[in-house]
Amino acid sequence: QVQLVESGGGLVQAGGSLRLSCAASGGTIASHAMGWFRQVPGKDREFVAGITWNGAVYADSVKGRFTISRDNAKNTVSLQMNKLNPEDTGVYYCNVAFCARQCTPVFGSWGQGTQVTVSS
C-alpha cells in the first residue's frame, strides 16, 4: 500500500499563507485522485480539496483561497493555502480519494498529518 507523509504545516497569522506537501512512497499516486482533509479536535475529519484527472474540487469554505496541485514526476500533491483564517486551524492529511462533487478518502489508515495553526 502507498504510504503518505504530510509536511509544511506551521503557525501563521490570519491572512498569511502556507504550502503543504504530501509525499508518496511505496507506489505511484499518478493514476489516483488525491484529496486533502483536515481535522479539529472533537470534530470529524472534513474534506478540503481534491484533484482528479480532469480538475480540482474544493470545499466551499476554501474556494478561492486554496489551490491543490500535483507533481506526478515527484509523486507529490501540494496544497497552497492563502488568506488563512483561524477556522482553517487543524491537522491536515492527504489520502487517495474518490472524488465527485467532493472527495472521500479511500485508505482507512492515515499518516501523521501536519498541524496548521492560524492565529487571529
Image: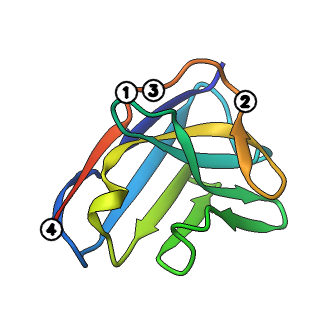
Q: Residue at x 60, y 60 (%)?
A: 70
Q: Residue at x 57, y 18 (%)?
A: 109
Badge number at residue 111: 3
Mark 4 crowdedness (10 Å alpha carbons): few <14, some 14-19, many ≥20: few
Q: In this rendering, does residue 108 appear at all?
A: yes
**Residue bearing mark 4:** 120
| Residue kind at label 2, given as amino acid type | Val
Q: Please tell me which residue lies in front, 35 or 38.
A: 38
Callout in the foreground (4, 2):
4
Callouts 3 and 4 close, C-beta under 8 Å: no
**Residue bearing mark 2:** 106
| Residue kind at label 3, given as amino acid type | Gly
| Residue kind at label 4, given as amino acid type | Ser
Q: Earlier in the sequence, mark 3 or mark 4?
A: 3
| Residue kind at label 1, given as amino acid type | Gln
Whole-number angstrom distance, CA of label 4 to CA of label 2: 34 Å
User: Residue 48's spot in the image, x, y percent?
Assistant: 56, 54
Q: Please tell me which residue lies in front, 42 or 8.
A: 42
The quarter of the image holding the N terminus is top right
User: Residue 75's spot in the image, x, y percent?
Assistant: 58, 47
Q: Say above or below: 44 vs 85.
A: above
